[in-house]
Every structure is written in structure tokens, then in C-alpha cells.
């Protein structure tokens, strides 16, 4: 399947958004696979395995991109490896252009402690943009209930910055839906969740949160930042 124009992608996103207004997560994934074939992928940070399991059930063989910043918790890498071993998906670890040492030489040590936005741009945003060059559409596990910044996230939309269609099959799900699905399907878990980490990113920028606090309040807790730039 050849690469589509921005106009074409915009039309497809509009059609999808209308058709999938009340669709289940499985129906959203099926539409994306039918529409984009091998030019559709999933991006996962492996805080859980829910979307990977749904995609593997609906369309085995889909590519899964994991942004391997070099700063993830071992529990996250363990879940990534478990998913790669047990589900019929092709997990691709996408690495930044610079190693951590090269980044430290260029920008100083521990950039995440001084300029997390720049660190995210180098270790997440740019690598995702490069990896998505092989695709016309991508799926993300983001949910509206995770934070006020995500409250209006569309299920299907045009990712105009990257010239892709972006789908969020779990946008309407709640944390309770996720927990129930993990239990029902007996999925492997990211062990940090049970330790109070409902939203998991890189180790230096993720803290456990108090019961009842916003899921993403443990991310970049010392900074104004609430998003890494992948979704904004
Ligand atoms: Fe860097 Fe933190 Fe962003 Fe990871 S989450 S890329 S360590 S600033």
C-alpha cells in the first residue's frame, strides 16, 4: 500500500471519526487495520498490555513501537519483553539518535532534571517522528480519564504535525475498564502499577501517586510539564 497524501489522510480521519463515534476499541482497531493495512502501527509505553492484547486479538502481526529512551524502569522493559514473547505482534524498540553519554556531552548531565521538555524532544518526540515515517496511521493507549489535558482526546483524528491518522481505541475507557480487562484476560502486568504508579514513563521523571490523585500527577512532578510532547 502506498503512502497517502495529507488531504487523503484528513478525509479518512473524518470518515473514521464519524463512523466510529460509538464504536468499541476492537471496532476502532479493525477499522484502522482495514483502512491502512501494514501502514498502521501501535505505539506503546508498556504501562500495561491492554492495547497490545486488543490489537493482537483483532489483527495479529501489527507492529508495536516502543520508545526506548534508555531510562525506563526494569519493570517496563520486562513487560515489553513478555508481550514480545507471548503475543503475535512485532515489537520494535526505537532508540534516540544520541546515547545518554552523547546527550550528556552535548547538553550537560541529567538533562531531564533541568530541561525535561528538551530531553523528551530528543529521546521520545524525534524518534517517534522518525519511526512513524514507515506508517500512515498509529494507535496510542491514551485515555480521556488520565488527566484534564486528555479530556477531549478524539478516538480518531488527524495528527497534522506528523501527517498521520491517530487512533485512540481506549479514549473512552476508564481505569476500572483497564483493570477489569487485565483481570479478565489474565494479562501480564507492569509490576510498578501495584506499587502506586498508575502512569509510567522514564524512571527519573516518574513518581508514585497518592490514592485518588490524578493518574499523571506523578509524571515530571517537580515541573509544570504534564505531557512529553507526543500527544500535543
Ligand atoms: Fe527524558 Fe524524562 Fe522525557 Fe524520559 S520522560 S525522555 S528521562 S525528560
Image (cartoon, helix red, strand yellow):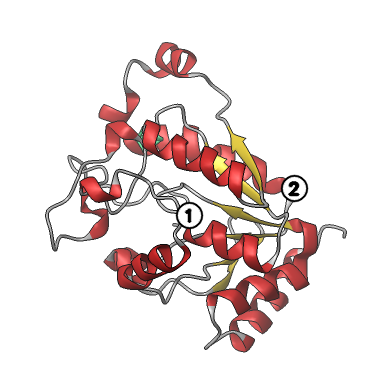
Disc 2 crowd, CA 10 A, few/some/many (<14, 14-19, 20+) = few
Q: Would you say residue 79 is visible in this rendering?
A: yes
Disc 1 crowd, CA 10 A, few/some/many (<14, 14-19, 20+) = many
Q: Is mark 2 within 8 Å of ligand 1?
A: no
Q: Is residue 228 left or right of residue 54?
A: left
Position of 204 relative to 167 (above/below): above
Residue sitting at x 46%, y 47%:
45
CB within 8 Å, label 2 to label 1: no
Residue 134: image tag: 2
Residue 58 lies, in percent from the top left, at: 66, 69
Residue 85 lies, in percent from the top left, at: 60, 41
Residue sitting at x 43%, y 68%:
184
Q: Is residue 218 left or right of residue 28?
A: left
Residue labelled with disc 1: 49
- Mark 2 secondary-structure assignment: helix
Residue 87 lies, in percent from the top left, at: 62, 51
Residue sitting at x 53%, y 38%:
81
Position of 219 relative to 151 (above/below): above
Residue 12 lies, in percent from the top left, at: 71, 76
Q: Earlier in the sequence, mark 2 or mark 1?
A: 1
Q: Would you say residue 114 is visible in this rendering?
A: no
Residue sitting at x 52%, y 74%:
155
Cα distance in 3D space between marks 2 and 1? 23 Å
- Mark 1 secondary-structure assignment: loop
Displayed quadrant of residue 179? bottom left
In what quadrant does ligand 1 lie?
A: top left
Viewer-side label of 2, 1 = 1
Which quadrant would the C terminus be assigned to in this image? bottom left
Q: Nearer the viewer, residue 6 or 207?
A: 207
Q: Is residue 154 left or right of residue 3?
A: left
Amino acid at each position: 500500500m502506498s503512502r497517502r497524501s495529507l488531504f487523503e489522510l484528513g478525509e479518512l480521519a473524518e470518515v473514521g471519526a464519524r463512523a466510529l463515534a460509538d464504536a468499541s476499541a476492537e471496532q476502532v482497531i479493525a477499522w484502522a487495520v482495514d483502512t491502512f493495512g501494514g501502514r498502521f502501527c501501535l505505539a506503546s509505553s508498556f504501562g500495561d498490555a491492554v492495547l497490545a492484547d486488543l490489537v493482537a486479538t483483532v489483527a495479529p502481526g501489527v507492529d508495536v513501537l516502543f520508545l526506548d529512551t534508555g531510562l525506563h524502569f526494569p519493570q517496563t522493559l520486562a513487560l515489553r519483553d513478555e508481550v514480545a514473547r507471548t503475543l503475535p505482534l512485532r515489537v520494535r524498540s526505537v532508540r534516540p539518535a544520541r546515547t545518554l553519554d552523547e546527550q550528556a556531552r552535548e547538553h550537560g548531565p541529567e538533562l531531564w532534571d533541568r530541561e525535561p521538555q528538551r530531553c523528551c524532544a530528543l529521546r521520545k518526540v524525534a524518534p517517534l517522528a522518525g519511526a512513524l515515517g514507515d506508517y500512515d496511521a498509529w494507535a496510542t493507549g491514551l485515555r480521556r480519564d488520565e488527566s484534564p489535558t486528555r479530556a477531549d482526546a478524539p478516538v480518531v483524528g488527524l495528527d497534522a504535525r506528523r501527517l498521520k491518522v491517530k487512533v485512540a481505541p481506549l479514549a473512552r475507557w476508564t481505569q476500572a475498564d483497564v483493570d477489569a480487562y487485565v483481570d479478565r484476560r489474565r494479562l501480564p502486568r507492569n509490576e510498578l502499577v501495584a506499587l502506586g504508579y498508575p502512569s509510567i514513563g522514564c524512571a527519573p521523571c516518574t513518581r508514585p501517586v497518592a490514592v485518588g490523585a490524578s493518574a499523571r500527577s506523578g509524571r515530571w512532578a517537580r515541573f509544570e510539564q504534564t505531557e512529553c510532547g507526543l500527544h500535543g
